[in-house]
Amino acid sequence: MTDQIIQNIKADFRKYLFQESLHRIEKCLNKLTAEEVWHKPNTHSNSMGVIVVHLMGNITQYIHSALGHEKDVRDRDLEFVNNAKLSKEELFQGIREVITKACLIVDQLTVNQVTKTYFVQGFEMSGLSIMMHVVEHCSYHVGQITYYTKLVKDIDTAYYGGMDLNQLNV
């Protein structure tokens, strides 16, 4: 039973991170110009480009380093520098590689590794908590990316295009 639950959690991690969030980031990047991707709306907001770089740092620290046992070399403050040198293609390639590797690491986790305690950014967390944090954190920022894209382009991203979302639970 426990093994099946862990397998379901791993599958959901991949679904939400790789299939949903990555797809939405790509869709938004493709709708915006390079200038729009790196535009910082005000002093208290980040550009979409900065948000993608921040997601790469977060996923790398939490999954690659904590769960994948790689050395933690994250410089979080550097992620918030508006580095317009990266093209849209480089941003997408970077986040795709980070998410792909994170999914591979999670796929290899044992039940003991999922329930084990880790220390990340000064927080004590189980492997499951780390996975939940990464999905939640990514979803939060993808929501910001989506809102910004809709605001700038006045479009419907049609993430659920063709689906009837008014179906009632049975």
Image (cartoon, rainbow, N blue to C red):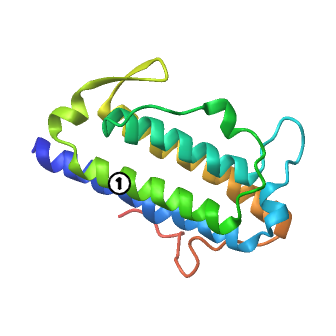
The picture quadrant where one finds residue 151 is: bottom right
Residue at point 76%, 49% (across, down): 83
Is 165 above or below relative to 132?
A: below
Q: How many marks?
A: 1
Residue at point 31%, 40% (across, down): 68
Measured as percent of width and height from the top left, residue 54 is found at 62, 43
Q: In this view, does 138 lie to the left or right of 145?
A: left
Can I make out residue 97 in this image? Answer: yes
**From the image, which quarter does the N terminus lie in?**
top left
Measured as percent of width and height from the top left, residue 159 is found at 59, 70
Q: Which of 12 and 118 is in front in this view?
A: 118
Q: Which residue lies furthest to the bottom in this view?
A: 162
Can I make out residue 17 in this image? Answer: no
Q: Nearer the viewer, residue 162 or 65?
A: 65
How many residues crowd around disc 1 within 10 Å: few (fewer than 14), some, or many (20 or more)? many
Q: Is residue 146 left or right of residue 72?
A: right
**From the image, which quarter does the C terminus lie in?**
bottom left
Q: In this view, does 28 lie to the left or right of 58?
A: right
The picture quadrant where one finds residue 94 is: bottom right
Is 53 above or below relative to 154?
A: above
Residue at point 30%, 55% (across, down): 104
Measured as percent of width and height from the top left, residue 72 is found at 44, 31
The picture quadrant where one finds residue 129 is: top left
Residue at point 48%, 70% (across, down): 167
Is 169 above or below relative to 119?
A: below
Residue, disc 1: 103
Type of residue at label 1? Cys
Q: Which residue lies furthest to the right in this view?
A: 42
Measured as percent of width and height from the top left, residue 22 is found at 52, 62
Element at label 1: helix
